[in-house]
Image (cartoon, grey):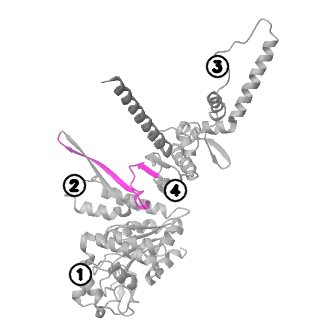
Amino acid sequence: MPYKNLIAKEDSNEKLRKGLADINGFIREYYSYIYMPVEAGIEEFTKLETNNMQKLIGTDINEKIREIIADKTLDNINIKLNAFIGELESKLKFYTYKHSKRTNISMNELTQKVIELFFSIRTLHKIKDNKKISADQLSSGEKRQAFIEVSVGLLSSQDIRNKEIIFAVDEPEASLSVSNNFSQFEKIINLQKNNMQILITTHWYGFLPVTLSGNAHFLSKEVDGDKIKFNFNTFNLYNYRERLRQIVKNRKDEDIEMPNDIQLKSMHDLVQSIVSSVRLNKPYNWLICEGSSDKVYFDFYFKDLVEDNNLRILPVGGASEVIKIYEYLKLPMSEKDNIKGKIYCLIDSDGKSEQLICDGKCKNNMVAKRILNKSNDQKTSLIDVNSNDYEMKTEIEDCLDGVVFIETLKTYTEDQNIVAILEDEKNFKDKSLNSYFCFDLKPSGQEVLKKFFDQDSGYRKIEFAKKYVEIARSNSVKNLDWIDEIRKWFKEKI
């Protein structure tokens, strides 16, 4: 290759290297990755001069020291020290203090000495009952709590408008008692509100119901003779219980592999997590419902309770699952002295008699109800699950705002059967009534609506719910009476 071409190629490579270096620099500047391994030592991890702590603080200690000392201060130190040496040498006729090529103290040397003499002698202590306890004197569980409390406290105070923070924690529950697991995960999960990316590895399933957004990845091992296969499955935490139920139901599907004990662990840790959450000083409240479409509506109608009253809306994949959870919760929820939060279990009226006896001991903090449309007043009522009243089959799509429901149906212009219903004024009775009673449909029209909502294995209902909420939000729709009844129950003191 000609010499000129070699030079040109080298110039091109140099530009590429510089470009890649610039990209690398930008990524390092923009993204801050903090990893907390399960075996990390509390004293070493929380030293102020370590990289992880500086990322948690959001400040480079070296830069902070340079800012405090300033170049002028360092120049003044060097000038005066050199002047002092000069004075000494003037008193010594035949002697001098010979120096190396470098005559002054550098900023790097000075900052390192400040770190060594000022920061490294400081260790983390926990203040308890006005006493300072060294971190290394804490129990294993207290150390793990300190890791999270320090990290969350520092990260929450950061201004992260111009960067992305990725916070990774290995087994936050390690060394903790079960009663402390919930609050430990709660602290980490709340960092989502600050737009941080949270990564957690765990063997504890109790975090699932309190996580409003995110994904859970399950890893399982399958051994077949001398072959080992690892299966990886992902859940959207928005509706994980419902999805889990579908997977267990269709376990024969080759593409669906789950840990064998996930059903048991998930239910056990779910109940344990709920019980722990209603016993907190700032307790959670729970609305446990059947499906994901229910959650979409309730997220909208109970937005104020979610934000102000720690309400969590949990879809569990069917009426039988709601009832099962209620049964598990009856005993711990009957212990009134420790219960500060409330649980509302809500299912549809599908004509099946649920074998459930509501426990009167916990009626002030936990109830199980059905939604049921009543023809006498043409409204939706909330009745006890074990009531014998099954006047008509009622699902949540039958209990919505009539006007918004109709406007949402109008967006499905590709469905000619729906269009035909909407174009015939004879199909309407009173649009001010709920989404069932506002219509005057013949059995054939009712069947059209049923088939419409049964499409796509339930996903049509979720899609419709999202469109309904969008229209309701833009039109400032009034609350529904039965929704207000649930809201009132949550706000009443136990």
- Going from N to C along the chain, the mark reached first, 4 or 2, is 4
- How many angstroms separate mark 4 from mark 2 (CA)? 36 Å
* Residue topped by disc 3: 102
Find out whether the residues at labels 1 and 3 contact each other: C-beta distance under 8 Å.
no
Q: Please report the residue visible at 29 percent of the width from the left and 69 percent of the height from the top.
A: 459
The kind of residue tagged 4 is Asn
Query: What's drawn in magenta, residue-wise?
Result: 197-225
Q: Look at discs 2 and 3 and give the one toward the viewer.
A: 3
Q: Which residue is mark 2?
A: 255
Q: Is residue 184 left or right of residue 206?
A: right
> What amino acid type is highlighted by mark number 2?
Asp
Quadrant in the picture for residue 374: bottom left
Real-space CA distance between mark 1 and mark 2, rounded to the nearest whole angstrom: 36 Å
**For this rendering, which residue is in front, 263 or 244?**
244
Circle 4 is placed at which residue position? Answer: 194
Res. 416 mark: 1
User: Which image quarter is the N terminus in?
Assistant: top left
Q: Is residue 201 rendered magenta in the image?
A: yes
Quick one: 489 or 10, which is closer to the camera?
Answer: 10
SS for tag 2?
Answer: loop
The image quarter containing residue 243 is bottom left
Question: Residue at 36% across / 84% down in the picture?
Answer: 435
Q: Position of residue 167 (x, y in %)?
A: 47, 47
Where does residue 53 sit, x and y in percent of width and height?
Answer: 55, 41
